Amino acid sequence: MWFLRIIAHKCSHILLFCSVFLYIFLMKKITTRQHAIYSYIKEFILLHKFPPTIREIGEKFGIKSTNGVREALLSLERKGLIKKLSRQARSIELLQSAPSLALAFNVPLIGRIAAGTPILAEENIEGTLAIDKAVLPRSSQIFALRVQGDSMTGDGILNGDLAIIRMQKNAERGQIIAAIIDGDATLKHYYPAENRIELRASNPTYSPIVVSENENFSIAGILAGIIRKC
């Protein structure tokens, strides 16, 4: 299960983490058909007090092949929304509430950034995360980066986390930014100086990255939150 931990900046050196964890549905977004099937199963159970059969689901959605229904159910099961308890006809159990498609926002997951392309260019996007709008920053200009390594463990940011970034071109001293250096994105504390920029890790075993005026450097945005698989 994935959770979103909202991050708020108390000062330039300290991050306060919200104590409330909010369930979100992410990774491969739920499709309109999958959402409809999930909603049908939920309504069927509420009405009849037991789940529908594969045949009943197929008839409802015009899916002639039982294998087609099984594939749809398997997708919902992989996304943690249902569970098939056995090979019996009525063995579907609901595990989580599916997110409302109207309330979800598809956050692009960015990989390596090709030279000369905008951050949100199609060739830079690895996938999307469907996240409830209520837990996201108000700005619609956001994207996600996958954290690699342990350089930010001092801020509770771990290898494999997904960092939610609010896009902007400037930052305050000490803020955690997504910096782009020669096409590679890195998450570090931002410390500008007169003729250089220092990007500092929060893990003391890492030395600062010093960026000179001649290097290809830009700020992609500032850290707004962290998604972690628990």
Image: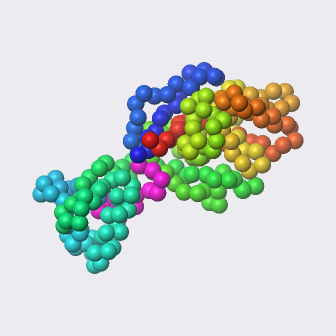
> Which residue ends up furthest to the bottom in the rendered image?
64
Q: Position of residue 15 (x, y in %)?
A: 56, 26
Please indicate whether residue 79 sits to the left or right of residue 227 in the image: left
Q: Is residue 214 magenta?
A: no
The answer to whether residue 47 is visible is: no
Q: Is residue 200 above or below residue 111?
A: above
Residue 224 at what x, y percent from top left?
A: 55, 36
Q: Nearer the viewer, residue 189 or 148?
A: 148
- Over which residues does the magenta segment extend? 25-37
Please say if 22 is above or below 17. below
Residue at position x 74%, y 42% in the image:
218
Query: How far across and down, in percent of the image, does residue 190 sit?
Result: 71, 31
The quarter holding residue 180 reads: top right
User: Residue 99 vs residue 211: left or right?
Assistant: left
**Is residue 27 rendered magenta in the image?**
yes
Among all residues in the image, which is located at the extreme left? Answer: 48
Up the image or down, 32 lies above or below 103; here it is below
Q: Quadrant of the C terminus?
A: top left
